Image: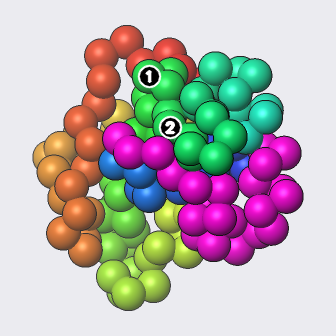
Amino acid sequence: MSSPSIEDYLKAIYHLGRGEPVSTQAIADRLEVTPAAVSKMLRTLSRDNLVQHRKYYGVRLTSKGERIAEQMVRHHRLLERYLVEHLGFDPDHVHEEAEILEHHISERFEDRIAELMGHPTECPHGSPIPPKRKHENAR
């Protein structure tokens, strides 16, 4: 079971890395935390087999970490779309709401809103919504 903090770190590495190693400083800048806080979390993520971390070379997501990160990105972008299309939020102001909600929706809820919206492929900002992976049990 992962926490919102772990999910935020995985999502940050996912966005920053795109398959390439990510520096501690880049993660710290993205999450607005100290490099020391990032180093501490990377030890936890590494211990839980969510990242591969090589000191001075950066960090990459493992397949398990990538599944969780993609799941969070999917939740986030589906929520943004739902908030705009069905609750009337302004597209410029949905990010913060989706940031909060993405950690708390169930897969059942995700499936229902995706179905309700006709399984959209993009968020309101044009970014792709990752497809749902079969047998998602990374969380």
Question: Which mark identifies residue 101?
Answer: none
Q: Tell me whether circle 1 and circle 2 mark residues in contact (CB < 8 Å).
A: no
Question: For numbered disc 1, what is the local secondary structure?
Answer: helix
Q: Report the side of 13 relative to 7 (left or right).
A: left
* Magenta stretch: dominant secondary structure: helix
- Residue at the image position 40 percent from the left and 81 percent from the top: 89
Q: Amino acid at mark 2?
A: Arg
Q: Amino acid at mark 1?
A: Ser
Q: Position of residue 106 (x, y in %)?
A: 54, 34
- Residue at the image position 44 percent from the left and 58 percent from the top: 16
Q: Is residue 97 above or below residue 44?
A: below
Question: Which mark identifies residue 60?
Answer: 2
Which of label 1 and label 2 is nearer to you? 2
- Residue at the image position 49 percent from the left and 25 percent from the top: 62
| Residue situated furthest front in the rendering | 56
Q: Position of residue 1 (x, y in %)?
A: 71, 24
Q: Look at the image and tell me whether residue 70 can be seen.
A: yes
Query: How many labels were placed on the picture?
Result: 2
What residue range appears in magenta? 19-41
Residue that mark 1 sits on: 63
Residue density around tag 1, few if under 14, some if 14–19, many if 20 or more, within 10 Å: few
| Residue situated furthest top in the rendering | 135
Task: Check residue 40 for magenta coloring.
Answer: yes
Question: Which quadrant holds residue 97?
Answer: bottom right
The residue closer to the viewer here, 98 or 63, is 63
